[in-house]
Amino acid sequence: MSFTTLGLDSSLLTTLAALGYTEPTPVQREAIPAVLAGGDLLVSSQTGSGKTAAFLLPALMRLLAAAAAPGAGPRILVLTPTRELALQVQKAAHGYGSAQRMRTACLVGGMPMWSQLKHLGKTVDIVVATPGRLKDHMDRRSVDLGRVELLVLDEADRMLDMGFQEEIDAIVARIPARRQTLLFSATLDGVVGKLAERVTKNAKRIALARTAQKKLDITQHALFADNEAHKGRLLDTLLRDTDIDQALVFTGTKRAAEELSISLVGQGFTAGAL
Ligand code: AMP
């Protein structure tokens, strides 16, 4: 199946071809026509499934098609749990929308407020934001959400895990009720389901199989260490296991990751910290 049957504008199809995308991923195949049809959507999908294009391509179609209501605020609002993901989404919007004119703003913590205010001083089409910083802008009255037509909650489960529920509710309360809402999450159960009930109307559900999890045959072990030195020796023994070619080691902090990678290099492993 190719992208041509999904109802996308030819300018977007040309961009996708130039990016080397030959066919839509399962989430794109299901979500793009559903978003273009106009209803609310709940999608359970994983990172790496192509979900960003699944919401950005129809969002870009909206900018191409409909005339904007008067005002300067964003027509598309994407909320993400982290600064990194927000920047990635903004970059993807410029990539997929490289054939069209649009203005975007990324409103995330840890970045200077003045440059964000400068972007918001002009008409903006797409805002990608983390809930905390967007709430700060709302409190300063530096952003107007009255023009938002499409709201995307990306990785909603992670946003709730990070304690953004209050901010999300405050943000959604400022967006016109006639909006279209798309919620993407690894799971749609529990608190995410409750959030979905509050922010969507008659939403269609798209649940995609967790292929990566189904394919992997994982055995889990817990090893108890007496102390740091013992933990180090256990790790060394594990990593020297002849069946292990590559390993991911998670640590509690960035500093611990850096120290561990240096120590592993010292022990003769090829290691790096992310
Ligand atoms: P995402 O899950 O949105 O983070 O996307 C994961 C990666 O897949 C990104 O690097 C995209 O550029 C890439 N991607 C998304 N859709 C397609 C597609 N239809 N064909 C090939 N690559 C894709």
Image (cartoon, helix red, strand yellow):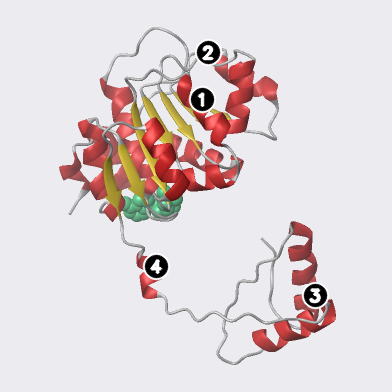
Kind of element beneath mark 3: helix
Give left or right: position of 111 versus 19.
right
* Labelled disc at residue 75: none
Mark 2 or mark 1: whose residue is earlier in sequence: 2
* Labelled disc at residue 212: 4
Residue 143 in the image, given as x and y percentages of width and height: 55, 16
Residue 3 in the image, given as x and y percentages of width and height: 22, 46
Tell me the mark number nearer the camera, choosing from 3 and 4. Answer: 4
Mark 4 or mark 2: whose residue is earlier in sequence: 2
Residue 257 position by quadrant: bottom right
Q: Which residue is mark 3?
A: 263
User: Would you say the residues marked 2 and 1 are in contact, meaning their CB atoms lie under 8 Å apart?
Assistant: no
Q: Which residue is mark 2?
A: 122
Mark 3 or mark 1: whose residue is earlier in sequence: 1
How far apart, in angstroms, are the residues tagged by discs 4 and 2?
43 Å
- At a point 66% along the width and 84% down the height, the residue shown is 239
Q: Identify which amino acid the numbered label 4 is placed on.
A: Ala
Q: Identify which amino acid the numbered label 3 is placed on.
A: Ser
How far apart, in angstroms, are the residues tagged by discs 3 and 1?
45 Å
Residue 146 position by quadrant: top left
Mark 3 or mark 2: whose residue is earlier in sequence: 2
